[in-house]
Amino acid sequence: MKRQTAAIRTQIPRTGEMEHSTPMFLTSSFCFDNAEDMRAAFADETDDNIYSRFSNPNVNEFVDKMVALEGTESGYATASGMSAVFASFMAFLKQGDHLISCNSIFGSTHTLLTKYLPKYGIEVTYVSAGNPDEWEAAIQKNTKMIYLETPTNPGLDIIDLEWVGNLSKKHNLILNVDNCFATPVCQRPAEYGADLIVHSATKWIDGQGRVLGGVICGKENLINDIYLFCRSSGPALSPFNAWVLSKSLETLDVRMERHAKNAHHIAKELEKHAAINWLRYPFLPSHPQYAIAQKQMVNGGAIVCFDLKGGLEAGKSFLNNLKMLSLTANLGDTRSIASHPASTTHAKLTEAERLAVNITPGLIRISVGLEHVDDILEDILQAL
Ligand SMILES: *Cc1c(COP(=O)(O)O)cnc(C)c1O
């Protein structure tokens, strides 16, 4: 099966009702016919579900689809993107280990790396997304993992996955990629040697702003370690959310195609606007890593960012002028969303920290939705 088909046709076995669409299994635990079956399940001799903290049919179906889309051996789903990210650290890192992370990463991941991992004796070095030379120089004897996002948020830097895949292999490191911004429809890090791929399913995977979820895909032995950590620590994805997310995957491919088409059009139309200093979109030739984006991405994704000439005040008044675009902390929705990182998501950073990851005072990030592209563009133009 092609990936698009697998995302639709992967389905757990039908019940006696012969339903067409997968039902919801809202059950916390599962029964056994006899003591021997129960013993065998607990001894991991069968794939039987035991308890929904460990596995559940709806969660299994969602994971099987994600594994098919990412092209990995195995996967495990969690309650949110952050629990997926956290599990991908905790299952492998121990006291005395060192992790290298790209400096431009999701805010809560930054908090885990700087506030919590050091508490457990895990050292972290940040390297610049735009400067590959720093990465190899940062590798130490005790380095265990490289962590990155590409495209980065909100600056849309593109990191060369082939290059970093080779670097990780050469130094025998676990390469852990947050693939949330591209989705597996647009970019498959496993093809370049990524060992772990983490997602916030809350974003385009749901794509309709309804539920939280997370998933980690990767090699069988690594996912088994993540499973054992999660089975004991409990960040289980709810069966209801898994059912929603599995349904969402049926339309991910067509949704991402339209998201990217709308975003690309808007980026082209706005690039030369008089109120804008610079604009970034991975599939515009003006993007500094355009060639890398062309190599590893199917399309440019759904995020467009630009810097307003008027700085902080212009950023705030742009948001106030919008009539249709939503002002909300989420992204990856059918509805287009605008945000001003300097006054919201990244307000706690110092100005220097913000500038290091390209967050200028006038930076605006648009998560381009599925409304008619003319309506999205008209709202942005009138707000500018
Ligand atoms: C939102 C997001 C996360 C965290 O996911 P939640 O589902 O909100 O916990 C992690 N990484 C990236 C890139 C994100 O955008």
Image: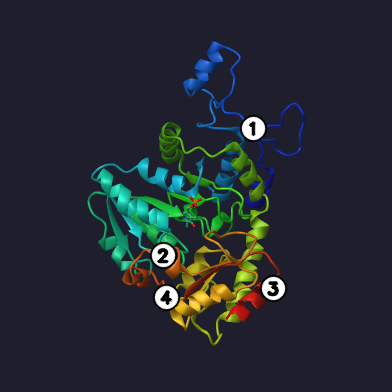
User: Would residue 306 be seen by someone viewing this image from the given angle?
Assistant: no
Specify whether residue 8 is in view: yes
Mark 1 Cβ and ligand 1 under 8 Å apart: no
Residue 337 figure quarter: bottom right
Question: What's under tag 1, amino acid-wise?
Answer: Phe
Name the residue tied to disc 4. 361
Q: Position of residue 331 (x, y in %)?
A: 55, 60
Chain-order first, disc 3 or disc 4:
4
User: In the image, is the residue at mark 3 within 8 Å of ligand 1 by its beta carbon?
Assistant: no
The residue under label 3 is 375
Question: Could you give the CA–CA distance between mark 2 and mark 4, rounded to whole angstroms?
Answer: 10 Å
* Residue ID at (65%, 60%): 334
Location of the C terminus (image quadrant) = bottom right
Q: Earlier in the sequence, mark 2 or mark 3?
A: 2
Asked where in the image residue 147 lies, by quadrant, the reply is: bottom left
Q: CA distance from mark 4 to mark 1?
A: 48 Å
Assign a secondary structure to mark 3. helix
Disc number at residue 346? Answer: 2
- Residue 167 x/y as whole percent: 34, 58
